[in-house]
Amino acid sequence: MKTSLILGIILIVMGAAVLGYDHYSYTTTEEVLKIGPLTATAEETHTVSLPPVLGWLLVAAGAAALVFGIRSRK
C-alpha cells in the first residue's frame, strides 16, 4: 500500500514533466573523416517529441495508484 502511494506520486510528477516539456534535445558527436592521425568530427542535435497523451496517461495512472493506495489502507 505504501509502495502504490509512492508510485502514484512518481507517475504524477513524471506526467507533469512530460506535459511541461513536450520535447527534449540531445547532441551526438560523430567522426566524419579520418585520415591517418587526423580526424574531423561533427556535432548533430537530435530532437525527440513527446506526445501530450503520454503525459495525461502518466497522470491518470498516478492518480489511480494513489486512489488504490488510499483505499487499500483503510
Image (tube, helix red, strand yellow):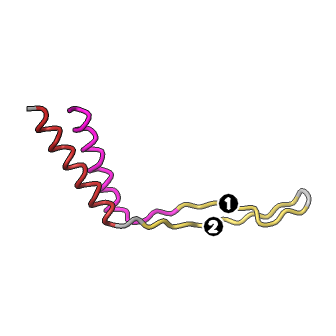
Give the residue at mark 1. Answer: 29
Give the spatial CA distance, label 2 vs label 1: 6 Å
Callout 1 amino acid: Thr
Q: Nearer the viewer, residue 13 or 68?
A: 68
- Please tell me the numbered disc located at residue 5: none
Label 1 residue SS: strand
**Please, which residue is most extreme toward the right here?**
36
At label 1, counting other C-alpha atoms closer than 10 Å, the crowd grade (few under 14, some 14-19, many 20 or more) is: few
Q: Nearer the viewer, residue 66 or 34?
A: 66
Q: Which residues are magenta?
A: 1-25
- Is 40 placed left or right of 46 in the picture? right
In percent of width and height, residue 29 lies at: 67, 60
Q: Above or below — where is 64 with respect to 72? A: below
Name which quarter of the figure residue 57 lies in: bottom left
In percent of width and height, residue 56 lies at: 27, 61
For the N terminus, give its image quadrant. Answer: top left
The residue at the point 33 percent across, 51 percent down is: 14
Q: Are marks 2 and 1 in contact (CB under 8 Å)?
A: yes
Q: Main secondary structure of the magenta part?
A: helix
**Please, which residue is most extreme toward the left here?**
74
The residue at the point 24 percent across, 44 percent down is: 8
- The mark that comes first in sequence, 2 or 1, is 1
In percent of width and height, residue 12 lies at: 26, 50
Give the residue at mark 2. Answer: 44
Callout 2 amino acid: Glu
The residue at the point 50 percent across, 63 percent down is: 25
17 inside magenta stretch = yes
Q: Above or below — where is 71 with respect to 33? A: above
Q: Above or below — where is 26 with respect to 7? A: below
The residue at the point 54 percent across, 60 percent down is: 26
